[in-house]
Amino acid sequence: MVKRHRWWLDTVQFIALVAGLIYIAVLGAEQLNYNWQWYRVPKLFWRVIDGELIWGPLIDGLLVTFEITAWALPLAILIGLTTALLRRSNSFAGRWVATAYLEIIRSTPILVQVYIFYFIIAPIFGIQAFWACVLALAFHEGSFTAEIFRSGIESVAKGQWEASDSIGLNRVDTYRYIVLPQAVPLMLPPLTGQVVTLIKHSSILSAVAIFDLTTMALDLVAETFMAFEIWLTVGAIYLVVTGSLSLLVGLFEQRIRARYRR
Amino acid sequence: MTARMRFGWLDVVVIGCVVALLAYVAYRVHGHLVYHWNWAEPLQFFFRRDEADGGWVPNLLIEGVIITLRVSLWGAVLGMAIGLLAGLGRISQVALFRMISRGYVELVRNVAPVPFLFIMFFFVGNQILKPLGLEGVQDAVSPATGGVLELMFGELNLLRNFAAATLALALYEGAYIAEIVRAGVLSIERGQWEAGDSLGLSRLHQLRHVILPQAVQRITPPLANQSIQLIKDSSLVSLLSIQEMTFMGQEIAHSTSRFFETWIIVAAMYFVVCFGLSRIYARLERRINKSRR
């Protein structure tokens, strides 16, 4: 029924196709008289001067990207958890605030949110550009983590709530001892997946003055006119970083599933 | 457990926090920054008086909305085509098609959006669209055709940039649409394929006459949500100097120095469009579900 295809033939075809695309791209650049200067790219990673290692702008930018992500992730998780709990609470004001937050974040572009945090929130609260960007990302991702927490909490069987009700636990204790211990393992893989999303979305911060990897790329393109080399290099850096993270998250998810799914 | 609404300690805490936050913001804006609100200045960018005949004509903000919708519309059309092909490629029996689609989807999902858009913009703009000769379109067509084209694609001397940016956006969204299509097709029970098989239909015919008609119903709601995502993502093409809503917001904010008012207005405009669409979709979905039952 299922026709067997020779996978190696397809692989060869695929490689040929990719090679062809690259050839066409190079040929096109040649026709534009584009001056390839790949030899200048390694210096943008690091240089050794007098036996001393000096990180180049690309590594510096990548480190800032990681720094932003490292701060934004715990904040996003905190915001998401608070939102999810408020939405499930029986407090009128709590639900209203959580819903308003979610709808506003979901109905405006992340770029506009970054501008709002950078041009409005930062001067009002007197915070630095870096923290404005971290907060913008955290509040944006918070809407995703809220959804992860919601579905995680809802995946806990109804009987568990009723059981803890019947042994007289209050709401806080129910969450603490019954619901969250069961829900958190299921939520961990998608929450770690948020790291990938955060790294990707942090590129949008380049629209304002923050020295992440994408900003470095923009500056370098303006400085050196090596548009193709730098964008391809930066694209490849993102691909390697988030690609390997995605793989790790996938493995993590499989392990968690194997352990907790009956 | 089924939460009854009632006024409790949590309400007091939440309302207290919100009031304290608002009071602090008000104090900082008026007491510390001594900011003088001036809504009239950015608001005049909705409409302006035409100097020639004194009538009202749309100004930057309205023009921005139109370009945003134009980019989103073409992005949706192209993205759907790309997404459908890539989604079906993902479940193809031919390994080559699976590899191409998988490679494309993973590439988009693992490269940050801004570098992706720049790479696609440069490559597509320089290498695919330049040979097409979009540069000379405004001289080549008659004024009437030019008018129609302008309505569809915006100013014709900017056509190449518009096309490159839209295509870059469509390539970005296409990967997400591909995953929706794939999930929709995979959600159809195996028995449907087998039934098609036993009727002697070829795989293409099974897909066309048996599977896709059922899958379309399932993928319509997520596709509708993706269209809202597309409108939001279209703000990213402002970084490619396409003059849509976010770009106009930036122009106005910098030229008037009215950062607070301008960005609040731009955010509100996106909110109206996206929130309105999501309400409309939710209503349609409920109505369709009701009629199906």
Image: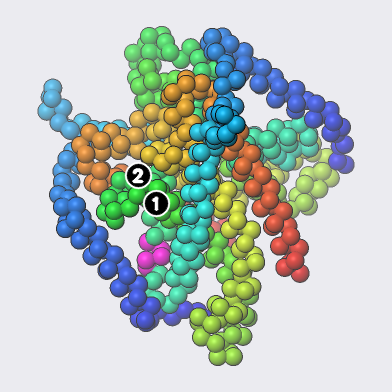
Query: Does any portion of residue B286 appear in the rendered image?
Result: no
Q: How is the image coloured?
A: rainbow
- Residue at horizontal 75%, vertical 26%? A15
Disc nearest the viewer among 1 and 2: 1
In-front residue for pair B255/A42: A42
Which residue is at the front of the view, B150 or B136?
A: B136
Q: Say what amino acid the circle numbered 2 marks.
A: Tyr
Q: Is residue A16 left or right of residue B262?
A: right
Residue B237, horizontal then vertical, whole percent: 43, 33
User: Which x, y percent locates residue A206?
Assistant: 43, 38
User: Which chain hosts label 2?
Assistant: A
Start-end of magenta stretch: A96-100
Taking the spot 29% from the left edge, 56% from the top edge, the residue there is A125
Label for residue A131?
1
Amino acid type of the residue tagged 1 in the rendering: Trp
Q: Which numbered disc covers residue A83? A: none
